Image: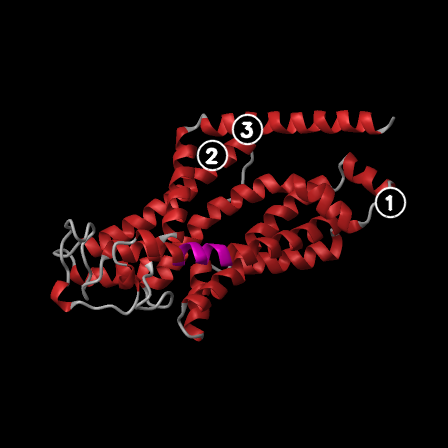
Amino acid sequence: MSAEPASVLDRVVSAERRELWQRSWKRFTSRPMSVIGLGIIVAIVLLAVFAPVVAPYPEHAGKFTDFSNTLQPPSVDHPLGTDHVGRDVLSRILFGYRLSLMLVGVVLGFGVPVGVLLGLVAGYYGGWTETIIMRATDTALALPPLVMALAITSALEPTLTNAMIAIAALWWTWHARLVQSIVASERSEEYVQAAKLAGASTPHILFREILPNTLSPILVKVTLDAGFVILIGAGLSFIGVGVQPPQPGLGTMVSQGTSYLPDSWWVSVFAGLAIFVLVMGFNMLGDGLRDLFDVEVNR
């Protein structure tokens, strides 16, 4: 007899969730810029994943040279021209997107969980625990990410891996600060007190009760952060301490192309536009999600 009411309740809850997602998707799609941003990110991710298939000259992403075809302007054979050693710029940009997205994945894949965990602990326990974690966070926040990343990569071997480590070493701080401020205001709410009275464990309260209420601002923050990570990674590559040749880093391509300006403008210009489009896509998507969830995060 009890199975039928439970089944009815499950169907009602499922229907409410579907209706909520439908309303949310309708609100999101009602903002053209948000949809465009999502489309840009999806398109670039697909191009990066299938770069070996869609790139006109996939072998140009590595140690390839053709000195009889150097610095050729955009043409049918090379839509975005060639660089100083005869490599196809379009092919290298597609593979460069791979490296940029990999950088985003590693940095945020490390920084977000660490920051969220520390923010949860600091916001929930308060007292000395909060003081110690937040003072360490404030100290790290006082260090400019690009300067700190430059110092770390200069001390270590300048590679993409070390650039990832350098950026990830500081990125957790933003999420720790964001989550701590949310949890500090949520820990006195009635649903948290009810969970405590019901005998729920601390991990249950943190991860099953409080954490879901922080997911919306975290998602918005992650989307906006992706653009900043890409810019910092491109900046490190531009000054020679990030992606190293012959890897097709977008910042490296911009740097190499500056030696041939203004005559051979296409190398730097198209690589710079590739960075611009990728960052713009993440920012447009992040702004759309921020409006959708009606949250405000520090950028």
Residue 291 is a magenta residue? no
Visible residue check, residue 64: yes
Q: Secondary structure at mark 1?
A: loop
User: Is residue 84 found left or right of 186 in the rendered image?
Assistant: left
**Residue at the image point whose x is 46% and y is 59% from the top:** 145
Local crowd at mark 2 within 10 Å, few (<14), some, or many (≥20)?
Answer: many
Residue 105 is a magenta residue? yes
Q: State the image quarter where residue 133 is shown.
A: bottom right
User: Is residue 62 found left or right of 185 in the rendered image?
Assistant: left
Q: Secondary structure at mark 3?
A: helix
- Residue bearing mark 3: 24
- Residue bearing mark 2: 288
Is disc 2 in contact with disc 1, using a CB cutoff of under 8 Å? no
Q: Which residues are magenta?
A: 99-106
**Residue at the image point whose x is 71% and y is 47% from the top:** 207
Q: CA distance from mark 3 to mark 1?
A: 34 Å
Q: Secondary structure at mark 2?
A: helix
**Residue at the image point whose x is 35% and y is 54% from the top:** 51
**Residue at the image point whose x is 56% and y is 26% from the top:** 22
Dot placed on the residue nearer the N-terminal end, 3 or 1: 3
| Magenta stretch, overall SS | helix
Q: CA distance from mark 3 to mark 2?
A: 11 Å
Residue 169 rendering spot, x and y as whole percentages = 53, 63
* Viewer-nearest of discs 3 and 1: 3
Specify the amino acid type for callout 1. Gly
Residue 236, compared with residue 130, is above or below; it is below
Q: CA distance from mark 2 to mark 1?
A: 39 Å
- Residue bearing mark 1: 199
Specify the amino acid type for callout 3. Ser
Visible residue check, residue 299: no
